[in-house]
Image (cartoon, grey):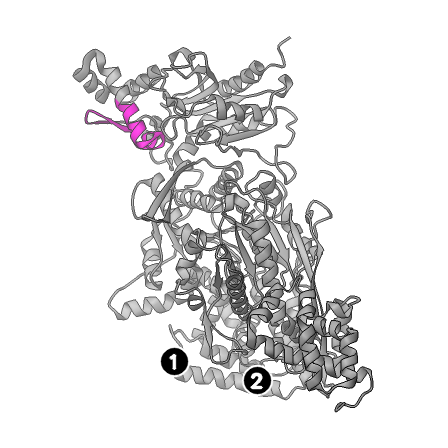
Amino acid sequence: MTKHTENRFEDAIEASLLSEGGYDKGDPKGFDPLFALFPHEVIDFIARTQEARWQSIKDLHGAKAEDALLSALSRELGNKGALHVLRYGFKCYGKTFDIAYFAPNTGMNPEARARYELNNLTVTRQVHFSERRPRDSIDMVLAVNGLPVVTLELKNQFTDQNVEHSIKQYKFDRDPNEPLFRFKERALVHFAVDTDLAYMATRLAGGSTFFLPFNKGDANGAGNPANPDDYRTAYLWKDILQADSLMDILARFLHLQVEERRRVTPKGVKIEKRETMIFPRFHQLDAVRNLVTHARGNGSGHNYLVQHSAGSGKSNSIAWLAHRLSNLHDDGGTEKVFDSVVVVTDRRVLDQQLQDTIYQFEHKQGVVQKIDKNTKQLTRALSSGVPIIITTIQKFPHIAQAIDTMAKEGETVDLDTSGKRFAVIVDEAHSSQSGETAMELRKILNKSGIESAIASEYLDEEEGLTEEAKQALIADMMKRPRQPNLSFFAFTATPKFKTQAVFNEPNPATNRPPFHHYSMRQAIEEGFILDVLQNYTTYKRFFGLIRQIEDDPEVPKQKAAKALGRFVSLHPHDIGQKVEIIVEHFRSAARHKIGGRAKAMVVTGSRLHAVRYKRAFDAYTKERGYDDIRSLVAFSGEVRDPDLPDESFTEVGMNKGIKERELPDKFASDDYKVLLVAEKYQTGFDEPLLHTMYVDKRLAGVQAVQTLSRLNRTTAGKEDTFVLDFVNDPDEIYAAFKPYYEATPPGEATDPHLLYDLQHKVEEWRLFDPSDVDAFCNVWFRPRPETIASEHQELNSIIDTAVERFKDLDEKSQELCKSQLESYRRLYAFLAQIIPYQDTSLEKLYVFVRFLIKKLPRRDESGAFDLDDEVALQYYRLQKISEGAIDLADGETQPLKGPTEVGTKAAQEDQVPLSSLIDRLNERFGTEFTDADRLFFEQVAAAAAADKTLRTAAEVNTIENFSLVFDRLLNGLLVERMEGNETIFARLMNDQKFRELASDHLLREVYDRLRRDSDLDAGG
């Protein structure tokens, strides 16, 4: 019986491709190993489709015409690559020949469609590909008009072989120098397949060949789901490699990615160029095709969420989607679905990648325009209908002003959006997409639609506004909900509740957002990213604080607690001990990783923390003579350290002149190993050599996921990551990551009536009346590009009246009132996008409240509460609490939470004595400390006080005579405490002034303590 053999697996695939896949059966004997072509099929295609040009070659070369054409084709395949030749043809003695025809984008070109139908795709089994090893054969080759484009090695578990054997066969039995396997020149992708799994590679390189999974995913993890009617991997040949699908991939997905990197060598700067043939991964292909299909069938006016994990290849997915949408026509094939595609991104790398990728498809300039100058450039691009526009969202609010400025300069720009539809691709969807700037994007891109939809019944309802103000108010109100001529395609790995609510087009399979999902778990299991929680170590600091003042003032509990925590975290001993742990850990456990190229990031709590970390880091490494672990620091602006009032610090200054834009490249070089950051490089920073992270900052929610995910990028030799966390609890990190590990269930929808409840509560404070709101809106909505001085005065005057009434409230009422005002502002901005209220009173109140909040007295910030002069650090210790993995597979995922009960109460501060608050902190963070656990000098003092010789000397001597005995014993006391305090010990031994100062302090401390213990008078 042979029903279970590999041949039967081949039979099944071949039968499917021949009967349903659009292929003809190829003849393995027709393959020429030298040309790595099926010559008969090549000549047949040329003769059938380009008869006149082929006849001219025959007239010129006679019997050698076929050899001449095949030689010319082979030469161009070697020089330009198979993908280029497939798309743009090849030259033979002055004639350009096509080797393939691709399906047109529209139905308006029947001739192009007829040419496409002339393609001949073949599936050929057991192809002998080598002249040197004529018995070797590849299981299956797919060819387009005689040009091989796909190879497959097939295995069958029933014969005790699987996909790993296929991969091994490609690596060790398929010489990459054979013409069929040469990179770019013939076959463009190689599939290793068994009945359960599929992998692919686009470059064979012997044992270092890198195969990527090409699987659908199973229950949010790796692999493929069971198929009740077929093999688990049947999608590969029934869908992906089906003739029309493969031709579509060759035409619109496959591309050559060229990366250049500058490397400094002793001989100068060397430019290293690396080429990678990009074949879409399954989830990328599936996402783009599903989005395109839905947009083609349903038109504009839909908001899609694409929740793809880090490591999903988002940049390529966006490039493919932008290209497809810019050429997309409706089901009839006659009308474009979108007039322009706007890609909203802050990433410079995406700009160039998008342009380079799309140029390969279109092979012409002007398809993509990057808006890198000013708003005028964006205005011109929108008005002239550039197919793909790359910009930041911040430029949209200034378009009206730009048009006015251009008109004054004599340049007329007609930004007419009537009848136009736009696709907006959002590179990173987050809460800012629901802000006023995003609303302006909608208003600009549907300018004509909003203007035409301002219905008279709305205007009639507004008696308190002028006609011009009414129209402007309605326009602003109507920009908030979904616009019928706009479709948003939002990409993110970590959607919040608001993101899911706004980009809510349901996935057809689950009937809920996201529209497409590629989970963190699948990305980890498939090896596209690393699990950053596998090696997670937490430290906890134990400290005690004492009051330095006689008084015991009443202080607000929360603010004082934060101030005390900040006092400890900025204390030189806290940072000094952490720097020592960081440096010694990195040198002993991390730097040898990734072949000695591993790098680390230190995440600090503030800009001042970053400055002090940098100073402490450099001092420690210099003192130790560690010249192999240089650091860079990243923070914005200028920082002044209260302990160094005469100095100021900037990123460029502390980095010895390295400019901000140069920092990523400098950090990537061999010169630097550690990057100290404060609110920078915690999102969107991709450095594959980043292996270890030291966290000294409170992290939660999406911020925790984004920050720690800086480690997850893969590179050759990187097998794991490491996190050492001084602040956060493993349970908190688990809670942050869990919603994004597999599926992200949405929470309950927000009740739309909450907004009216909140409107009532806000108005109940009687800070303003309807006439104040109308007066403000009449000024605000006057049709001018910019507010003039007199209008600015009017606006402030109206708001100031409400501010004065606010000041008359007691402190508790002010807190509650302001909380409700802020809640109304946030809730309206959110709900108005998903609920068409059509209520102008809500919009007017929103505009008024937005500006009122800006002028209300600011509540005291926690950071401004200063207890530095009132407390001192009594004892301190860092202790490892946990290490190992945080397992995200455990537990249930909780839904994302949205607004529910809002603006009803403000946080109340308990007033407690400072001493009791310190006791609470010590109780929470402390353990059973012995005297030897105190700070270093306290350790020495405690040991000295227990020494019998010193005790006796103190009882019978003045402090001057006692000092003679103390100085003689001090060295021994210091040596006993040397372990774990090497830095300060070395300073005491080597720095005479430092030693004298420290010795004098210790002398007085020990003498006074011993005298008190013996109840002796201070004078002795």
Along the polypeptide, which appears first: circle 2 or circle 1? Answer: 1
Amino acid type of the residue tagged 1 in the rendering = Ile
Residue 293 image point, x, y percent: 49, 40
In this rendering, the answer to whether 948 lies above or below 316 is below
Rendering coords of residue 66 (x, y %): 26, 15
**Residue situated in front as seen by the camera: 706 or 946:** 946
> Which is nearer the eye, 686 or 430?
686
* Residue occupied by mark 2: 802
Q: Residue 650, located in which quarter of the rendered image? A: bottom left
Tell me the magenta residue range.
72-96
What residue do we see at 59% from left, 65% from top? 983
* Amino acid type indicated by mark 2: Ala
Query: Neighbour class for label 2 at 10 Å: few (<14), some, many (≥20)?
Result: some
Residue at the farthest top position: 1
Residue at 37% across, 67% down? 400
Check residue 829 in the rendering and tell me which mark sits there, or answer none: none
Q: Secondary structure at mark 2?
A: helix
Circle 1 residue: 788
Residue drawn at point x = 58 percent, y = 24 percent:
194
Point out the residue furthest to the left here.
Answer: 60
Question: Residue at the spot x=57%, y=75% of the render?
Answer: 994
Local secondary structure at mark 1: loop
